[in-house]
């Protein structure tokens, strides 16, 4: 069964805006390749292929700190280390480790 036209349009919009974000802010901010793929795919989980979006148009993911504890989405940039799919538990790193010079 195919997705409804509205859901397909939503996926297209999220993929377009996610691609722009992934390859501008994402490159400057050091997002990992897997996180950039997640954003540019339109919030599709890399493992279970589920469309992860909330009604508020934000990604429906778990944000985890370096110890694996859940933190609020608003603290993701400051304290987030990993994102995880709430459906299958797949986890990916948010940013590349900074290289010391």
Image (tube, helix red, strand yellow):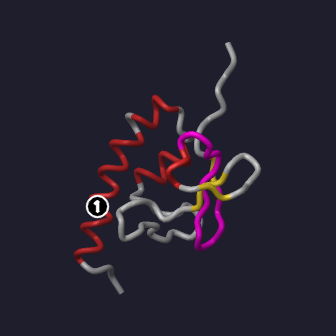
**Helix, strand or loop at mark 1:** helix
Q: Residue furthest top?
A: 101
Looking at the picture, tell me which residue is in the foreground, 63 or 33: 63
Q: In the rendered image of this protein, does residue 60 appear above or below residue 20? A: below
Picture quarter containing residue 32?
Answer: top right
Question: Is 32 placed left or right of 68 in the picture?
Answer: left
Residue drawn at the location 29% of the way across and 73% of the way down: 7
| Magenta segment includes 84 | yes
Image location (x, y in percent) of residue 13: 27, 58
Q: In the rendered image of this protein, does residue 77 appear above or below residue 29? A: below
Question: Is 47 placed left or right of 7 in the picture?
Answer: right
Question: Is 28 placed left or right of 57 in the picture?
Answer: right
Q: Which residue is mark 1?
A: 12
Mark 1 neighbour class, 10 Å CA radius: few under 14, some 14 to 19, many 20 or more: some
Residue drawn at the location 64% of the way across and 63% of the way down: 90
Looking at the picture, tell me which residue is in the foreground, 47 or 83: 83
Q: Residue furthest right?
A: 67
| Magenta segment includes 100 | no
Q: In the rendered image of this protein, does residue 7 appear above or below residue 74? A: below
Image location (x, y in percent) of residue 15: 34, 55
Picture quarter containing residue 6?
Answer: bottom left
Picture quarter containing residue 43?
Answer: bottom left
Image location (x, y in percent) of residue 50: 49, 71
Residue drawn at the location 48% of the way across and 54% of the way down: 38
Total numbered circles: 1
Q: Residue furthest bottom?
A: 1
Residue drawn at the location 33% of the way across and 58% of the way down: 14
- Looking at the rendering, the stretch of residues picked out in magenta corresponds to 77-91
Q: Quadrant of the C terminus?
A: top right
């Amino acid at each position: 069964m195919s997705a409804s036209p509205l859901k397909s349009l939503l996926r297209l919009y999220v993929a377009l805006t996610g691609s722009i974000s992934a390859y501008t802010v994402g490159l400057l901010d050091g997002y990992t390749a897997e996180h950039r793929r997640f954003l540019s795919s339109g919030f599709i989980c890399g493992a279970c292929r589920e469309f992860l979006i909330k009604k508020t148009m934000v990604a429906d993911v778990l944000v985890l700190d370096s110890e694996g504890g859940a933190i609020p989405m608003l603290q993701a940039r400051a304290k987030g280390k990993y994102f995880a799919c709430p459906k299958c538990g797949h986890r990916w790193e948010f940013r590349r480790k900074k290289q010391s010079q």
